[in-house]
Image (cartoon, rainbow, N blue to C red):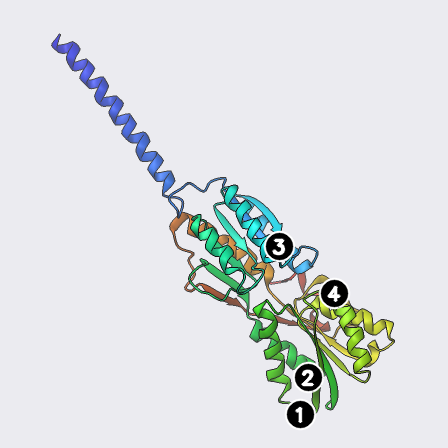
Amino acid sequence: MKSRTALLTLLVSATLTLAGCGSGGSSSNNASGGSGKSTKGGLITIIVNDPSNPYWKTEGSVAAAEAKSLGYKANVAASKGDTNTESTLIDTAITNKSVAIILDPANASGSIGAVKKANAAKIPVFLVNAEINQEGLAKAQLVSNNAQGAALGAQQFVKVMPKKADYVELYGAPSDNNAQTRSNGYSTVISQYPGLKKVGKEVANWDRTQGHDKMQSLLQAHPKISGVIAGNDEMALGAIAALKEAGKLKQVKVGGFDGSPDAVDAIKKGELQYTVLQPVASFAKKAVDEADQYLKTGKTGASAEKQAFDCILITKAKVNDFSGPFTLKK
């Protein structure tokens, strides 16, 4: 009996030891997620503005590719700059149990509620391209250095313009802080050249069609302009189309901002004077890397929430330096 009792005791002890080992293995897996949950195979939701614009298409496709390369599933959706749509997409991301959200915010102030909603669901949010007007909500905000990029563009604009001339500006979406930052950057540089006078400014909301239509209106009001400085390439390309129709493209210098493939082609043709490359492919990838790092360690690895990536001036001399959309050869 004693030996039998001893055998039973040994078996129970071994079973408990094995159970303890199993529990320890489970704890190790849980430690891989910043929220205490395993992120292997989890869903990362990526919300961009409008993928019909090559800039935002690149933003979404690069982020999705990086997420998949790290072992996540990826879903790309578009808000079209509408905060109600954005809010619905955040709800969907929550319902789908996303482990992280990469968000290009629709509105600097209006998107704060969407980020708070995700936070309440314990889903970390990583902002790309545009900021929100409140720090401490997103785990990271990765954007182009718009002030630096605007200064580069304005300096080139001054170089290609006559010393004395009138010009107009096409302005992006007022709800996006980038629009004002670029406009301020343009004015800071160009105001140092008193011979250059801004005689008109129209909001074209980053859109090519609106850029075309607003350019037509500006030409009617100011037929003798010599330059157009635009807040992005889509508006600049719309302006070029309108100038062609009016037979005035040879007399008017147009500058853009983004570094889109269509803008690069327009530079090659001599229709666009320059563009300013936003490194969207770089910071879209980086946002996903920081999300992965956060989910595994609880930290992004970055020294600050807001991270600015310098822009690069693209002129005719650099149009063959691209290895892909919005990406220069190293």
Q: CA distance from mark 3 to mark 1?
A: 41 Å
Do callouts 4 and 2 mark residues in contact (Cβ within 8 Å)? no
Which tag is nearer the camera, tag 3 or tag 1?
Answer: 3
Do callouts 3 and 1 mark residues in contact (Cβ within 8 Å)? no
Which tag is nearer the camera, tag 4 or tag 2?
Answer: 4
Residue receiving disc 4: 208
**Observer-nearest of 169 and 111:** 111
Q: Can you give x and y, in whole percent of width and height, for residue 29 in the image? A: 38, 39
* Residue 4 numbered tag: none
* Residue 158 numbered tag: 2
Reading the chain from its start, which is encountered first: label 4 or label 2?
2
Work out whether 249 lies above or below 35: below
Q: Can you give x and y, in whole percent of width and height, for residue 175 in the image? A: 59, 67
Residue receiving disc 3: 79
* Residue 194 numbered tag: 1
Q: Secondary structure at mark 2?
A: helix
Amino acid type shown at disc 4? Arg
Near mark 4 (Cα within 10 A), the count class, few <14, some 14-19 or many ≥20, is many
Which residue sits at x=65%, y=90%?
193
Do callouts 2 and 3 mark residues in contact (Cβ within 8 Å)? no
Q: Secondary structure at mark 1?
A: loop
Check the picture and name the quadrant holding the N terminus: top left
Left or right: where 86 falls relative to 31: right
Amino acid type shown at disc 1? Pro
Which residue sits at x=69%, y=70%?
318
Near mark 3 (Cα within 10 A), the count class, few <14, some 14-19 or many ≥20, is many
Q: Can you give x and y, in whole percent of width and height, for residue 143 in the image? A: 54, 65
Amino acid type shown at disc 3? Ser
Which tag is nearer the camera, tag 1 or tag 4?
Answer: 4
**Observer-nearest of 265 and 179:** 179
